[in-house]
């Protein structure tokens, strides 16, 4: 089964001071098996990865893959989209979801 990590990065040196343009921030899907980028989506200005991840997932055939995303991407809508695209996921749980984090911590 293919593991596809999804992560965002800011492109170094992409800030344009003269035109007051913010740095380019991309969300990428990486093929662990083939060691190459499967796709990238630009994060909209004044937004974050949560809005870009669903757009990236739509571009990919992720069926029977395992998708990993950092804690920012641990969102119900994103998990549902991955499930609906017939893939599995590994999503970390941290302080960004305090109630669920506490419940899981108590369970373990």
Image: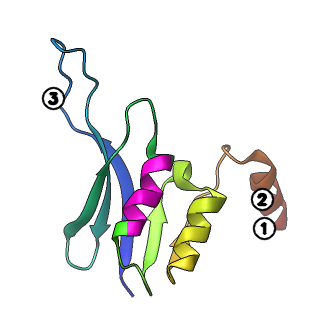
Residue found at x 77% / y 55%: 100
Q: Which residues are magenta?
A: 51-58
Screen quadrant of the N terminus: bottom left
Residue identified by numbered label 3: 13
Residue identified by numbered label 1: 108
SS at mark 1?
loop
Screen quadrant of the C terminus: bottom right
Q: Are marks 2 and 1 in contact (CB under 8 Å)?
A: yes
Residue 78 higher or lower than 96, as above or below: below
Residue found at x 45% / y 77%: 66
Residue found at x 55% / y 51%: 71
Confirm whether the magenta stretch covers residue 99: no
- Front residue of 95/23: it is 23
Residue identified by numbered label 2: 105
Left or right: residue 35 compared with residue 95: left
Q: Are marks 3 and 1 in contact (CB under 8 Å)?
A: no
Q: Nearer the viewer, mark 2 or mark 3?
A: 3
Residue found at x 41% / y 67%: 58
Work out how far the residue at label 2 is from the one at label 3, CA to CA, in angstroms. Answer: 41 Å
């Amino acid at each position: 089964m293919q593991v596809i990590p999804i992560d965002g990065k800011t492109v170094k040196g992409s800030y344009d001071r003269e035109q007051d343009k913010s740095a380019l921030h991309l969300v990428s899907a990486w093929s662990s098996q083939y060691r190459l980028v499967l796709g990238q989506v630009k994060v909209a200005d004044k937004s974050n990865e949560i809005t870009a991840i669903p757009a990236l997932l739509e571009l990919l055939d992720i069926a029977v893959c395992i998708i990993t995303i950092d804690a920012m991407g641990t969102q119900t809508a994103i998990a549902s989209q991955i499930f609906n695209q017939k893939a599995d996921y590994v999503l970390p749980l941290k302080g960004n979801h305090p109630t669920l984090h506490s419940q899981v911590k108590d369970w373990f």
